[in-house]
Amino acid sequence: MSNQHYKRAIIFSGGTLGEWALDQLSPDDYLIGADRGAEFIIENGYVPQLALGDFDSVTPDQMQRISNVAEELLSCDPIHKDWTDTELALREAVKRGFKDIILVGALGTRFDHSLGNVHLLRHALEHKANLTIIDANNEISLCTEYHRLEANPRYPYTSLLPLSPEVTGITLEGFRYPLHNATLKLGWSLGISNVLEEPTGTITISTGLLLVIRSSD
């Protein structure tokens, strides 16, 4: 089956994963397992269309199972590579034409990896793809001009943080703490912990890159 039959790509990375990650799945998703993420897909009864990475986080037996089950396997040397397994997976998803990409297992105990994965939102933007990072308590996306949010009891809090040095012209509608033509600069915490009080809310900006982080405690 060609990629055009799939609605979106879901990348399972090697960070923290759980039942919540499986809740994201739809029948027409293209499943990509990055390193240990491929083993997670398989051990939960699914078949990854693509498994890739250096696979330094799986046992030889797990590696054999990944090789046997995955529809396609791309293995790379753990030393002589320029990108993390997660970035390799994102680059492959973009290369294969996916414009809607979900990334799970990208956040965990390694803050360097977590922060690096958040920065992948910009890489996706540069390739005209929409990337959303999801874990058990957070949904992270990027606003460049206009962002519409539907109320979701799973994520009662919405925080806005600049990913560029400055974000200007920020206007919020439907939120408890509205903003009109405001500016946020890197290092400011003004945009943390807002609350959506209407069924839908909108975020509009003039310039910059704005992280939209929906969270629960």
Image (cartoon, rainbow, N blue to C red):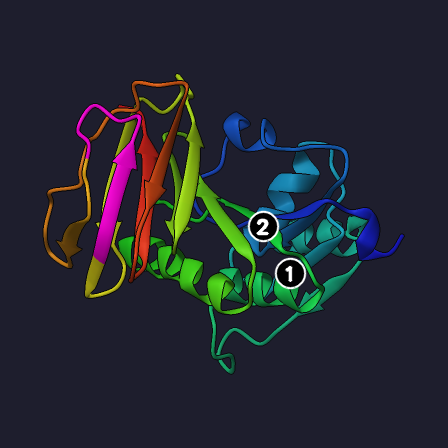
- Near-viewer residue (30 or 210): 210
The answer, for residue 132, to whether it is visible in the render is yes
Which mark sits nearer the N-terminus, 1 or 2?
1
Q: Which residue sits at x=15%, y=53%? A: 183
Using residue 111 as the reference point, say whether residue 135 is left or right of it: right
Q: Which residue sits at x=41%, y=63%? A: 122
Give the crowd class for mark 2: few <14, some 14-19, many >=20 residues within 10 Å: many
Q: Which residue sits at x=68%, y=57%? A: 51
How far apart marks 1 and 2 lie (CA) works out to: 8 Å
- Near-viewer residue (84 or 213): 213
The percent coordinates of residue 211 (x first, y second) are 31, 49
- Tell me if residue 217 comes above or below residue 147 in the rendering: above
The percent coordinates of residue 75 (x first, y second) are 66, 69
Q: Which residues are magenta?
A: 168-178
Give yes or no for residue 176 being in the magenta stretch: yes
Q: Count the marks.
A: 2
Do the residues bearing badges 1 and 2 touch, measured as CB atoms within 8 Å? yes
The answer, for residue 109, to whether it is visible in the render is no
Using residue 95 as the reference point, say whether residue 128 is left or right of it: left
Residue on which the image places disc 2: 101
Q: Which residue sits at x=32%, y=40%? A: 213
Q: Amino acid at mark 1?
A: Ala
Using residue 152 as the reference point, say whether residue 67 is left or right of it: right
- Near-viewer residue (36 or 191): 191
Which secondary structure lies at badge 2?
Answer: strand
The percent coordinates of residue 200 (x first, y second) are 41, 25
Q: Residue furthest front?
A: 181
Q: Where is residue 206, by image quadrant?
A: bottom left
Using residue 82 as the reference point, say whether residue 54 is left or right of it: right
Q: Which mark is residue 93?
A: 1
Which secondary structure lies at badge 1?
Answer: helix
